[in-house]
């Protein structure tokens, strides 16, 4: 099946850099894992394992503006008090992107076992929204960073975009599959941004297959592991090279 091409616009969002701690620096584009999560939410799929093997590609078709805000952020300093209470919160600076417009391509990968595929479900959801059963606001990243528009990509959306391409020497270390209990099971890939035409076939190295780490057994999220997660310090992550 031909790849599905979508246009996505988000007025305000922030994609926290993996090495950011006190100052919440944003990445210049959303990671593949974030886009995959948004696509699952669009079709109302709560099980992120359902479409393992699906392949996505993305490109920025705008140059988002950067700004910085001061906001209250959660941190873990005391396990005796709940999240966001007392010393478990503090004011910190956060970078924001405004005016984000993306082109997103989705296709069924050779390892995707789901039938219908994610691309097929997305096509139905976009062309016939009444057929999609979903809940909640559609966001890209934080729950307050709501998506404004999702539709099929059109010729007048632009001629060129900044494509996210796999590159061992790239300056963006991004998660493909996140481990929400700690970070030991997070799968990282190295990327760079390359200006390419939006029309025609998407380059092979611009496709990312959604997959899990094969050398790590992810633990089920239970009340016990949730408490452990709150107590644990953030795990190591690759540093984006400047």
Image (cartoon, rainbow, N blue to C red):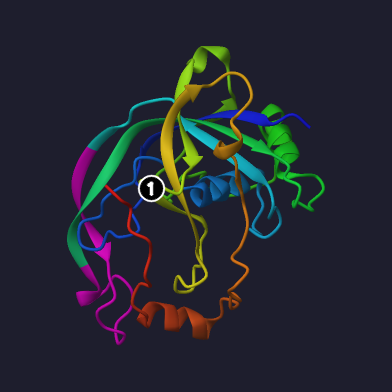
Q: How many marks?
A: 1
Judge by depth and name the residue closer to the eye, 205 or 7: 205
In the picture as drawn, the residue positioned furthest to the front comes out as 169
In the picture as drawn, the residue positioned furthest to the right comes out as 115
Would you identify the image quadrant in which residue 50 lies?
bottom right
Name the residue that disc number 1 marks.
Answer: 172
Q: Is residue 139 left or right of residue 209?
A: left
71 in magenta: yes
Instruction: Give coordinates of residue 215: x percent, y percent.
Output: 59, 73
Circle 1 crowding by C-alpha within 10 Å: few under 14, some 14–19, many from 20: many
Q: Secondary structure at mark 1?
A: strand
Q: Is residue 142 visible?
A: no
Would you identify the image quadrant in which residue 85 lies?
bottom left
**For the N terminus, which image quadrant?**
top right
Judge by depth and name the residue closer to the eye, 199 or 192: 192
**Magenta part of the chain:** 67-89
Instruction: Give coordinates of residue 113: x percent, y percent.
Output: 79, 53
In the image, what residue occupies the spot 51% across and 86% down? Answer: 224
In this view, 224 is above or below 24: below
235 in magenta: no
Q: Is residue 116 visible?
A: yes
In the image, what residue occupies the spot 64% across and 57% down? Answer: 46
In this view, 219 is above or below 155: below
């Amino acid at each position: 099946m031909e790849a599905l091409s979508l246009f996505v616009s988000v007025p305000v969002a922030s994609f926290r850099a993996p090495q950011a701690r006190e100052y919440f620096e944003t990445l210049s584009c959303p990671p593949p894992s974030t886009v995959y999560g948004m696509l699952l939410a669009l079709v109302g799929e709560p099980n992120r394992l359902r479409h393992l093997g699906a392949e996505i590609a993305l490109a920025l078709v705008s140059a988002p503006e950067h700004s910085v805000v001061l906001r209250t952020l959660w941190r873990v300093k005391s396990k005796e008090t709940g999240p966001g209470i007392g010393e478990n919160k503090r004011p910190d600076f956060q970078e924001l992107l405004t005016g984000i417009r993306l082109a997103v391509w989705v296709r069924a990968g050779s390892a995707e076992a789901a039938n219908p595929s994610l691309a097929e479900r997305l096509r139905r959801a976009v062309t016939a929204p009444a057929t999609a059963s979903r809940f909640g606001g559609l966001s890209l990243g934080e729950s307050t960073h709501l998506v404004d528009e999702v539709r099929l990509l059109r010729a007048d959306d632009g001629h060129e975009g900044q494509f996210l391409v796999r590159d061992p020497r790239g300056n963006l270390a991004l998660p493909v599959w996140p481990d929400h209990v700690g970070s030991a099971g997070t799968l990282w890939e190295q990327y760079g941004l390359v200006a390419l035409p939006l029309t025609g076939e998407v380059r092979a190295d611009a496709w990312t297959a959604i997959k899990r780490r094969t050398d790590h057994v992810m633990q089920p999220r239970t009340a016990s592991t949730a408490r452990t997660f709150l107590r644990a310090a953030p795990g190591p992550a690759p540093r984006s090279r400047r």
